[in-house]
Image (cartoon, rainbow, N blue to C red):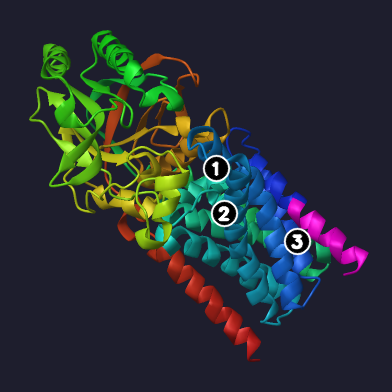
Amino acid sequence: MNSLRIFHFVLAAIGGVFAVAGFAPWNVFPLPVVSLALLFFLWNRTDRPRVSAGLGFAFGLGLFGAGTGWIYIALHDFGHMPAALAFLATTLFVALLAAFPALAGYLQAKLPLPSWQRLTLLFPALWACVELLRGYLFTGFPWLSLGYSQVPDSPLAGYAPILGVYGVSLLLALSAGLLALLAQQRWNRHGRRALILLSILWIGGAGAGIIEWTSPTGLPLKVTLLQGNITQDEKFEEERLIGTLETYRRLVEGSDARLIVLPETALPLLRDSLPASYLDILKSHAQTHDGDVLLGAFEEQDGRYYNSMFSLGTSPSQNYRKNHLVPFGEFIPLRSVFGWLINDVLNIPMSDLSSGGEHQPLLHLAGHHIAMNICYEDVFGEEIIRALPQATLLLNTSNDAWYGDSSAAMQHNQISQMRALETGRMMLRATNTGVTSVIGHNGRILQMLPQHQEAALTAQVQGYSGATPYVVWGNMAVVVLLLAMFAAVWRWRIR
């Protein structure tokens, strides 16, 4: 391998690292566009599939290595996996994710086209296609899909209510292709076209962002979102149990809101094991304010265990059980093969849960129809919209204490911002150690608690009705766009 090729691989990896700065907590949204343009520029300089795949893989190593390195914290610091094994597992996971941009690089090199068509059709379509694939394959891991980096400040975020996160990724990749073409062609005919199309794309996004797709409905609701700040290594310790219950009792009784929300599995007992007197205290307090309190705990039914949220208060008691579970964290795929990992290596409580099912009723609490989602579930926009347009509010409860003081919690909050934009609904987030926040229907953070502090966030929130285009057609619109782009690629290829 010659030194120039090595330099290109290093450059691609650096580009992937810099793309991470486009995501929360840094939010430098132009960086992913520039970084991807660099990768496209390098792809356009070679027609060798293996080299293109290597460039894509290097970019992916930089992106996912820098952006999801917090997996090591969950495995080692809280899962108690030996350091060497945790490092190996994290490296293999990053390599698996990096295989997706490598696949895009390999496939594009198999389809020889003029630069104009490669940069404006083939590269963007393949990039969006492998992001979609990553979001569905093996139950899906769409974390760090580039579209998230554009929320909330980029003009491209204006397309989120129309095309969803994958559509924003597609338009970001198209922007990167146009930018690479502009750098390559400069001010000739193709360069001028690229500049014009890039301007139209971004101005159009800014214009789309002004459109109000949904409208307020009902009266404002006073809510309190609790952040107990129970560290993960203490959460399931028996001697810490009484302190945990007392913390949440005190925080609940300190609120006069109609809806009070505890984080995911805030009460580290099975629901049936929670003291009846304790639940009566919380229920009585909620009824005093003509409202409800929503509690997070595990449930057991017929030998199956569920990650659950359940309500007490003025409304009839209701519950939601997490549907989309995390492989190895909440269930064991191919148990006969991988069961040893959970049983003998990792110390992850309640790591073999059951799914609550796709079609669960909305929560009708404090006068609102609430679409509940627990932790990782808000990563899947196509699943969130199942509850719409009936739902007036979105609510996420999470426990990102698994990832310590890393960027994971802010990245997760940014994902919730995308869900708010896609649906035109406010998103409420109650988390154990952060990020606890209230997100407006336009995807902007209205209130947020500092991380790793015990606190309660009280806010007036507004329900919304109506349906954005994304709620109506989900990911089908971006799939149709991709098919049209591939059809155009094929037409150019057979000329």
Label for residue 180?
A: 3
Whether residue 174 appears in this view of the structure is yes
- The spot of residue 244 in percent (x, y) is 32, 17
Q: Which residues lie in the magenta part?
A: 1-13
Label for residue 93?
A: 2
Q: In this view, does 370 lie to the left or right of 263?
A: left
Q: Which residue is drawn at 37% across and 54% down?
A: 332
Residue lying farthest front?
344
**The quadrant where residue 8 appears:** bottom right
- The spot of residue 11 in percent (x, y) is 81, 55
Q: Distance between the residues labelled 3 and 1?
A: 33 Å
Front tag of 3 and 1: 1
Q: What element carries label 3?
A: helix
Q: Is residue 216 magenta?
A: no
Q: Is mark 2 on a helix, strand or loop?
A: helix
Q: Is mark 1 on a helix, strand or loop?
A: helix
Q: How many residues crowd mark 2 within 10 Å: few (<14), some (14–19), many (20+)?
A: some
Q: Which residue is drawn at 11% across and 19% down?
A: 276
Q: Which amino acid does label 1 sit on?
A: Ile
Marks 3/1 in contact by CB < 8 Å: the verdict is no
Q: What residue type is labelled 2?
A: Phe
Marks 1/2 in contact by CB < 8 Å: the verdict is yes
Q: Mark 1 points at which residue?
A: 71
Q: Residue at x 81, y 71 (%)?
A: 45
Q: Distance between the residues labelled 3 and 2?
A: 30 Å
